[in-house]
Amino acid sequence: MTVTQDQFRTKLEELPRFKLSHLNTPLEPLDRFKQALIDEGVEVPNRMLVKRDDVTGLAFGGNKGRHFEFEIAHILEGGFDTVININHYHSNQARFIAAGCAKAGLKYHIVSHDSLDAPLTGNLLLCKLMGAKIHRTPLEYARQVADKIFKDETEAGRKPYILPDDPFADVMGMIGFLETGLELEQQLEEADVSGPVRFWGLTGRSIAGLRLYAKNRGLDWQTTACQYSPGEVEDFQQVTADRSSQVAEMFDLEHSLDNDDLQVLSDYRGPAYGEPDDRVIEAIRMVAKAEGLILDPNYTGKAMSGLIGEFRAGRINSEESIVFIHSGGLPQLFAHADKFVD
């Protein structure tokens, strides 16, 4: 028995929420990009579309605007007044927490590790503009720095919250994309897309949420997730399956995810997290010239390089409609400006 759309809506409405995003985001065709591939002699499916979660609105947009509507509400409900986050210099997540904290009147510390000598640009610059207290440190000292901030804020009479310590932070992204599934089911019907659909994006909670939605709705939706940083594929699949079990319990779903529910590609992650290769640079240029659509070097550019690479290798079923999940990340394009100068 499938879970109804109303069941998903009811469960979502029961959760605390703090409005951050402009929803629904558009679903648009990628016809000129498709033609560019055809001109190369590449076989492509009849329909190629993009889900524009880069236009959620807040702080340059992105999929995490959906995630943090639930997370910021969760923090406020807990009575916290200060958020301490630990993440990489390139982090989109760090930017969105800064924006959410600014909107909610919360004090925000970002313990930003790696790329210590990089200029203050991209996401980290936006964090500063939105009032974040930035603490740049090597990764091995990040937790120590966060604990010191926690102690100092507590002694000052505040109620701090360390984001990575809360299990809810591990599932709120999947929850946000159950709602995206509701949007997409209606949008695909309106676009007259029939038959199997393959959603294409990045490893993470968002695409997992779509697969979980589809599995419980009985939809012929498959997912391919490209890695953007080092890590074992099996570890990601297992962690995702475990988290999906928590969400399934929260939403009274029939099914959680199995390890093989997400196809994961590791060949397009580049030399390191935050480091694009030539295929990523080509993908960004190709999509920008064909569609006026801007991708970034750390995240969506890697996912698109994977889509192009798999098309060229003939490994994509032409009977499937492709929906590319544009999860945002635009500010980091400017942190890599030198790679796009001829």
Image: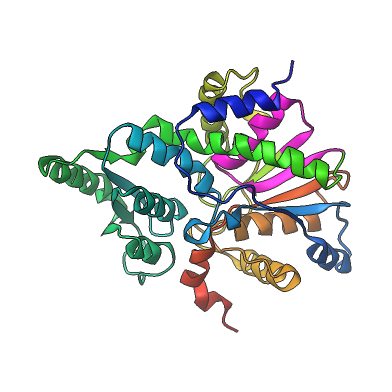
In the displayed orientation, state which residue is furthest to the left.
155
Where's the N terminus, which quadrant? top right
**In screen coordinates, is 220 left or right of 71?**
right
How many marks are shown on the rendered structure?
0
Is 305 displayed left or right of 327 in the figure? Answer: right
Which quadrant of the figure has residue 133?
bottom left
User: Is residue 296 one of those drawn in magenta?
Assistant: no
Q: Name the one closer to the observer, 18 or 219.
A: 18
* Residue 257 visible to the viewer: no
Name the residue at the top extreme: 1
Q: Residue at x 82, y 41 (%)?
A: 189
Determine which quarter of the picture holds residue 264: top right
Camera-nearest residue between 269 and 57: 57
**Quadrant hosting residue 150:** top left
Determine if residue 259 is in view: yes
The residue nearer to you, when weighing 111 against 21, is: 21
Q: Is residue 4 above or below residue 64?
A: above
**Image coordinates for residue 32, horizontal then vertical, percent:** 81, 66
Question: What residue range appears in magenta?
Answer: 195-222
Most distant residue in the bottom direction? 342
- Identify the image quadrant of the C terminus: bottom right
Q: For the point 67% across and 69% down, which residue is it?
A: 282
